[in-house]
Amino acid sequence: MTNKLSRDSIRDGDVYRMLKEQEHLTNIRPLTTVEREAALDRFLEHAPPGQLWVLGYGSLIWNPAFHYTARANARIWGYHRSFCIRTPLGRGSPDNPGLVLALDAGGSCNGVAFRLPAKRMRDELSVVWAREMAVADSYHAIWVRAATPKGPVNALTFAVNRSSPRYAGRLPEQELVDRLANASGYLGSCAEYLENTVTHMHECGIRDAHLFHLHQLVQAERSKKS
């Protein structure tokens, strides 16, 4: 398993293999290719008309791993960015679960929207789907209306499934800092994940006062141990 998810590694099934190898430790069953593709087909039955985009709010901002024809800063309402999914692999381990980002209900979120190529829309979405919807109960794929500098677009994005056993809810700040500063797994550390997200948000001119504050606290925590 590589430390960075790439288009090739996703299409080659690395996400599925990572989950399958650890299933006996995590009790997380990965979906087969047939199950994932069928779920994507069902989701696309309700796709809005016109050009379709994917909204990234975390690692998709700095590592989309799919092909796109345009990108733009975007904002949605009704959801906010939150470290609210516990992960016992990828960015954590069974004995020290990490945290990854999802959209949770309430507020608003600034991110990056990527326009899918019209003639290859289904193929490119399958890459995103294999990465984000590898298990059935962590995320809900949703359609949102996102505001961009050139007008609103219809975008696919991923909100947390609050019924998932890995839903962390709103954690105390110190627990957030401890987990993000110390947890790591196959894909690297939570601190690296946070660092990459914040760095690329700054580069794109995207603001998130809470996330930036959390980043400073995690940096300070890690500096105590260096």
Image: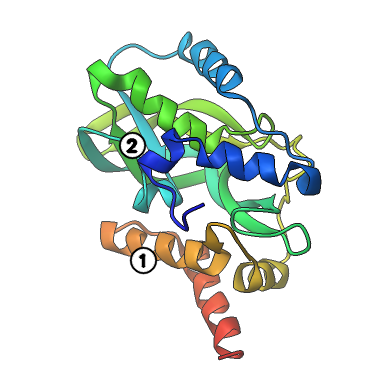
Q: Amino acid at mark 1?
A: Thr
Q: Pointer 2: residues within 10 angstroms few (<14), some, or many (20+)?
A: some
Q: Residue at x 71, y 47 (%)?
A: 22
Q: Residue at x 67, y 52 (%)?
A: 87
Q: Is residue 118 left or right of residue 113?
A: left
Give the answer, above or below, for where 49 lies relative to 222: above
Q: Is residue 73 left or right of residue 138?
A: left
At which x and y percent is residue 110?
A: 40, 48
Give the answer, above or below, for where 128 lies relative to 226: above
Q: Examine the rendering and report whether any part of residue 104 can be seen.
A: no
Q: Earlier in the sequence, mark 1 or mark 2?
A: 2
Q: Which residue is mark 1?
A: 199
Give the answer, above or below, for where 53 lies relative to 44: below
Q: What mark, if any, has residue 21 been given in the picture?
A: none
Q: Amino acid at mark 2?
A: Phe
At which x and y percent is residue 124?
A: 35, 27
Q: Residue at x 50, y 71 (%)?
A: 215
Extreme residue in the top direction: 45
- Element carrying mark 2: loop
Closer to viewer: mark 1 or mark 2: 2
Q: Is residue 38 left or right of residue 145?
A: right
Q: Is residue 103 left or right of residue 61?
A: right
At which x and y percent is residue 30?
A: 66, 33
Q: Which residue is mark 2?
A: 66
Q: Examine the rendering and report whether any part of residue 181 can be seen.
A: yes
Q: Residue at x 55, y 23 (%)?
A: 33
Which quadrant of the rendered structure holds the C terminus?
Answer: bottom right
